[in-house]
Image: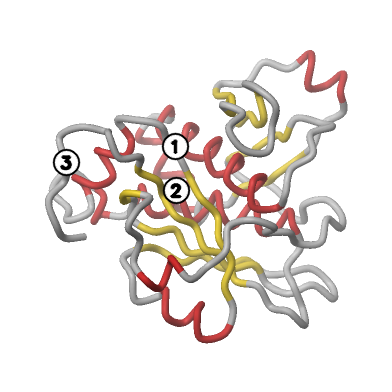
Amino acid sequence: MSGQIPDDHDIPWAMQLVVYRDRQSPARQVDVAETAARAVVALLADPRSAPDGPWYPAVKHWRDARIRKLVRRADGKRWTDVQELDGVTVTQAGSGEFGDAAVRAFVPGPVKPLPKELNKLQVSGTTFPDDGASNVTDAKVTVEVRPGLEMTSGKLAAQCAHAAQLAWEAMSEAEREQWRADDFRVRVDEPREAEWAAATRPVAVVDAGLTELDGPTETTRAWW
């Protein structure tokens, strides 16, 4: 990451996430959401994001404001091109006829101007097959999605990534190392209405309602 980090937040910053889309064998929505969560935590846990690392000023500037995340999709050469930008790619095995999920999380930066490799990619309409529950078992972290919400796959991925990030930030060092040893695996669940209403979890995400949701809405929670 190069360039001067501003002292204020007049220009919004975001962490860009790019999801690989295989047109012939797309990944399932739940696998994409879990992989996005893992990619974000992998970037935050990367030594380059530590206080003495080259990514730290950008990560800190972004974290001091809203932890905004924007999810885009790419395939073919466009997916290959974005691998050259600073970030971390995580892949997760698919299920049955569905393809593997792959997400690259990028070092945060201003929403405009974007590197040309990212600017070419679409944000709207990022949708993957909503087919079945998670195959992940015995994960260190579980992210719960509020039942009944209607979100695109991209929005869901961002909300799950928010929850995973807040979990990482709330953990002790020992818990972080346990999660790191498990490759930051996450299980994404959608509990029943009664279970959601009754549960209390260590972290919760409240979306501001600026895009797909109407008004501030609690979207996801995480526990470990």
Tell me the amino acid under the disc marked 1.
Trp
- Does 115 appear above or below 44? below
Q: Secondary structure at mark 2?
A: helix
Of pointers 3 and 2, the one earlier in the residue sequence: 3
- Identified at 14% across, 57% down, the residue is 3
Tell me the amino acid under the disc marked 3.
Pro
Tag 3 residue: 6
Tag 2 residue: 41
Residue 71 point in image, percent of width and height: 55, 55
Residue 30 point in image, percent of width and height: 73, 53
Is the C-beta separation of discs 3 and 2 under 8 Å? no
Tell me the amino acid under the disc marked 2.
Val
Q: Nearer the viewer, residue 138 or 161?
A: 161
Of pointers 2 and 1, the one earlier in the residue sequence: 2
The CA span between labels 2 and 1 is 7 Å
53 vs 104, left or right, is: left
Q: Secondary structure at mark 3?
A: loop
Q: Nearer the viewer, residue 112 or 163?
A: 112
Query: In front: mark 3 or mark 2?
Result: 3
Is the C-beta separation of discs 2 and 1 under 8 Å? yes
How busy is the neighbourhood of tag 3: few (under 14 within 10 Å), some, or many (20 plus)?
few
Residue 189 point in image, percent of width and height: 75, 40
- Identified at 28% across, 44% down, the residue is 59
Q: Nearer the viewer, residue 180 or 162?
A: 162
137 vs 108, left or right, is: right
- Does 102 appear above or below 149? below
Instruction: Name the image colouring.
Output: secondary structure
Tag 1 residue: 168
Of pointers 1 and 3, the one earlier in the residue sequence: 3
- Identified at 33% across, 70% down, the residue is 85
The CA span between labels 3 and 2 is 24 Å
Residue 150, located in which quarter of the rendered image?
A: top right
